[in-house]
Image (tube, grey):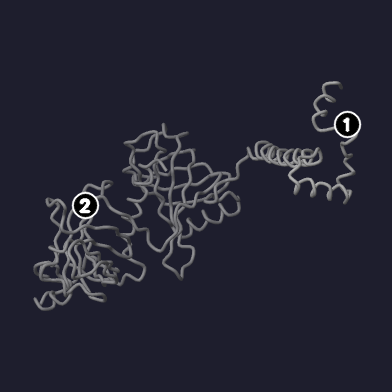
């Protein structure tokens, strides 16, 4: 008690301290204002300051306590689908659309390759049964291992948009189904992860994945009396990739099932600049590496030039954004190697290739 009196002695006698109720006394606040404006530090001013800082400290401390006490059960990321009904609906849609599922072991084996599967049945109790080719050497030792499964859905049939989903589950059973197929069942996932949603999955392919690339203008093919169904009659291309050059004259900046963007050095356009105008129509032969197969994939594409990036008259690189309007498939007609199909929903084989490369890069980054 004596120590408290000595401490308060510097601020006046104990009877000068206001009671808590005096804080609501208008006269007390008038004295506080007069004390503050006069520059004289009064006991009332010190008490008010202590009360304000004390309340602020209590509020901050309470906030930290609430965050620590009740924030430990973190909310799931916004990209996760955790509602059982929504998970069931999406997997039922994958079954109905016969969506291709990319299956790969969780990254405990960096050298493990992925494979494609088709969903046969979905059931929250029995799990998800998938069918794979018998070329996959499945063994009973797979049971219990974790696999990452990625698939895509076209939720709105009126739009060329896909939603990409993934989940990780344990293998529950593996069995042979005849000589041609393997049936694998995985446990029901606790959540799905929304990976990406866009019209076409666009990737930036590494240089070593673009093995060959040639570009023709439609008019030059017509001038040479070439037949669109026979690439050998198209003549000399306007652009040709030479991977031995550094830097290369032409690069694939990005690619998707719906289009291609090229970057070309000005010297690669010598004599052809006037042809590269928006709305111009071109033909492209493209050969891409496919690590999952024994041989690369070859594409023949009919393109419409949508955008030109950079000043056509300046030096340096020029960018060209092409939209795929049709794609070539093997033809049964005599004399023609190709028949052309309209790419209303893009080029499916190229879209699949971009999807596989996206998953491969996604996994290699450890995301």
Q: Is residue 257 above or below residue 205?
A: below
Q: Quadrant of residue 105?
A: top left
Which residue is nearer to you in this view: 45 or 271?
Answer: 45
In the image, 152 versus 203, the foreground residue is 203
| Location of the N terminus (image quadrant) | top right
> Does label 1 or label 2 sit earlier along the sequence?
1
Q: Secondary structure at mark 1?
A: helix
Q: Residue 203: give x, y in percent of width and height.
A: 33, 55
Say which quadrant the C terminus sits in. top left
Question: Which residue, given by chain and number where applicable, does mark 1 sit on?
Answer: 14
Left or right relative to 149: residue 339: left
- Give the residue displayed 34% in from the left and 38% down from the top: 112
* Label 2 Cα neighbours within 10 Å, binned few <14 / some 14-19 / many ≥20: some
Tell me if 187 is positioned left or right of 354 in this view: right
Left-right relation of 128 to 262 = right
Quadrant of residue 136 within the rendered picture: top left
Question: For numbered disc 2, what is the local secondary structure?
Answer: loop
CB under 8 Å between discs 1 and 2: no
Nearer to the camera, 238 or 331: 238
Residue 97: percent from the left, percent from the top? 45, 60
Residue 129 placement (x, y as % from top left): 47, 47
- Badge 1: residue crowd in 10 Å (few <14, some 14–19, many ≥20): few
- 290 to 364, vertically: above or below: below
Rendered location of residue 193, percent (x, y): 50, 49
Q: Examine the image and state in which quarter residue 298 appears.
A: bottom left
**Residue 296: mark in rendering:** 2
Seen as rendered, the residue at the extreme top is: 2
- Residue located at (39% from left, 33% from top): 108
Determine whether, in the image, residue 120 is placed left or right of residue 84.
Answer: left
At x 74%, y 38%, the residue is: 54
């Amino acid at each position: 008690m004596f120590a408290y009196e000595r401490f308060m002695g510097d601020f006046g006698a104990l009877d000068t301290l206001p009671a808590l109720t005096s804080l609501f006394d208008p006269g007390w606040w008038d004295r506080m204002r007069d004390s503050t404006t006069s520059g004289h530090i009064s006991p009332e001013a010190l008490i008010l300051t202590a009360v304000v800082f004390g309340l602020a400290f209590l509020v901050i401390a309470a906030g930290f306590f609430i965050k620590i006490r009740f924030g430990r059960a973190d909310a799931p990321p916004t990209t996760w689908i955790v509602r059982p009904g929504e998970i069931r609906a999406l997997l039922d849609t994958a079954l109905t659309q016969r969506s291709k599922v990319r299956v790969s072991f969780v990254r405990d084996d960096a050298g493990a390759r992925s494979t494609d599967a088709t969903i046969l049945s979905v059931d929250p109790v029995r799990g998800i049964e998938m069918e794979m080719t018998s070329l996959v050497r499945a063994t009973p030792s797979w049971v219990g291992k974790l696999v990452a499964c990625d698939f895509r859905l076209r939720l709105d049939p009126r739009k060329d948009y896909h939603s990409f989903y993934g989940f990780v589950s344990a293998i529950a059973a593996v069995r042979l189904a005849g000589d041609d197929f393997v049936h694998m069942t995985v446990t029901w996932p606790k959540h799905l992860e929304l990976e990406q949603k866009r019209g076409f999955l666009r990737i930036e392919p590494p240089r070593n994945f673009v093995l060959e690339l040639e570009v023709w203008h439609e008019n030059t093919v017509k001038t040479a009396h070439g037949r669109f169904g026979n690439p050998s009659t198209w003549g000399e291309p306007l652009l040709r990739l030479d991977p031995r050059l550094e830097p290369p004259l032409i690069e694939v900046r990005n690619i998707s099932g719906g289009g291609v963007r090229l970057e070309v050095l000005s010297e690669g356009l010598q004599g052809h600049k006037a042809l590269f105008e928006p709305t111009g129509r071109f033909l492209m032969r493209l050969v891409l590496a496919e690590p999952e197969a024994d041989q690369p994939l070859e594409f023949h594409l009919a393109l419409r030039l949508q955008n030109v990036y950079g000043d056509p008259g300046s030096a340096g690189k020029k960018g060209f954004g092409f939209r795929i309007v049709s794609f070539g498939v093997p033809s049964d007609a005599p004399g023609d190697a190709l028949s052309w199909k309209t790419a209303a929903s893009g080029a499916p084989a190229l879209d699949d290739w971009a999807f596989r490369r996206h998953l491969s890069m996604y996994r290699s980054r450890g995301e």
